[in-house]
Image: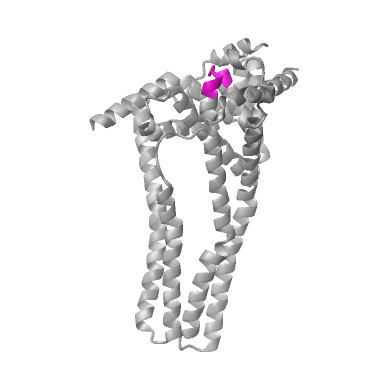
Amino acid sequence: MKSQARSEGEFLELVQANRQRILRICRVYAWTPQDQEDLYQDVLFQIWRALPGLNHKVLANTWLYRVTLNTAMSFSRKHARQRSAQPVEGAELRQMAEERQGVAEATDPRLEALYEAIGLLNETERAAITLFLEGLSYDEIAGVLGLEAGHIGVLLHRAKKKLSQLMTEELA
Amino acid sequence: MNEAELKSLWQRQELQPPVSLPDAEIMNRMRQKLRQFDRNIFRRDMREGVACAVVVGMFLWEFFVESAALARTGCIVVIAAAVVIFGKLVVRRHFKTKRGEPDSVKEFLEKERRKMTREIFLLRSVFWWYILPLLVGEELFVFGLPRPLANKLVATAVCVAVSGFVYWLNQRAVRKYLVPLQEEMETAARVAEQMAGEPGEQDGNAKENS
């Protein structure tokens, strides 16, 4: 009972401290506010489930990004699959676009262009650039992605180049 | 915009949680979700277990009631097939579950890809491990029974039609959902491998940043 209370406290503390990070990643991988909400709930649930595996010798940062990114990728793939299985009707498509538009109006257009551009990168680049923007070092990005630190430079170099092109087009 | 501006723009965002809940409510939802998750797994296993138990029970009873050797052989084949199918679906799933440190993105993608390949293999070969053993057992049983040939043919036609439908459903799932998903995963893994395999053109900021 005591240990359950401790892990609940630890979970709430972790979520509280990293809420903005989780929300930013949810926005990268989920398109509409409804999807973002579902993904946010999924991420919290996966963090809660994976918490017993949190090794305190490992940086909580890396651990959290692994859980969040893995959940977000799974979510995004599952949703893409559902959407391709059930073609979206005209009205629904309009509603999604309006919801997206509502979000866009409320945020900085450069930020919106950044999200749009990140959404057009491939899966690995998207994850790497998100972690880069989060301020992780190359070693930490390598730890989260499971790649060698020496390769992160190449990956980010390409991703940044693409991102810059895409953002220029988005903002034009 | 330079990189520093981009990072600052990104990190300065103040996003609102979709639903703002007090801590007690968040924990309550987590516990509910965990209970629901465990309940769903239990129900799925129970459904498959009950289906297996019903088939085993029915054919075990027939085994003791029927005296024809062919019909009794059919019963044994069906029972064995049901147990193997149950084992393949349920036991395998439980042995694979483990909790520990979460995977890196690369490991996660690799595991997902392997899981998908196994699932596709399982569904593509459904005829051999699911349909055929049950169908052979049922047919031995039907033809072993002391009934008119017309009845046996009708029972055979029903069994073949049901088996055909099950086969069609499985192959449709492979074609429509799993293969496109597998291709998508393979592309992602290939891109990751290609990127990991070309360290020659690292950008100049690599050391500075790490």
Where does the image place residue A93, in percent across and percent down from the top left? Answer: 66, 35
Residue at (60, 54) in percent of width and height: B173
Can you say whether A46 is above or below A81 in the image? above
In the image, B118 versus A34, the foreground residue is B118
Q: Is residue A161 above or below residue B49?
A: above
Residue A42 position in % (x across, y down): 46, 34
Along the viewing direction, whichever of A114 and A92 lies nearer the viewer: A114
- Looking at the image, residue A161 sits to the left or right of residue A23; the answer is right
Query: Which of the 4 quarters of the picture holds residue B162?
Result: bottom right
Please name the residue shown 72% across and 21% down the image: A170
Does the magenta segment cover residue A140? yes
In percent of the image, x 34 and y 36: which residue is there?
Answer: B31
On the rendered structure, is B99 left or right of B142? Answer: left
The number of callouts visible is: 0
Is residue A99 visible in the rendered structure shown here?
A: no
- Magenta span: predominant SS is helix
Indicate yes or no whether the magenta region holds residue B80. no
**Residue B104 left/right relative to A110:** left
Comparing A149 with A76, the one in front is A149
User: Which image quadrant for residue B29?
Assistant: top left
Expressed as whole percent of the image width and height from the top left, the position of residue A64 reads 45, 27
Magenta stretch, residue numbers: A132-141
Image quadrant occupied by the N terminus of chain B: top right
Q: Give the colour scheme of this rendering.
A: one colour
In which quadrant of the rendered image does the C terminus of chain B lie? top right
Q: Residue at x 28, y 31 (%)?
A: A4
> Is residue A66 at all visible to an observer of this figure?
yes
Query: On the image, which quarter does residue B74 sit in?
Result: bottom left
In the image, is B176 to the left or to the right of B67? right
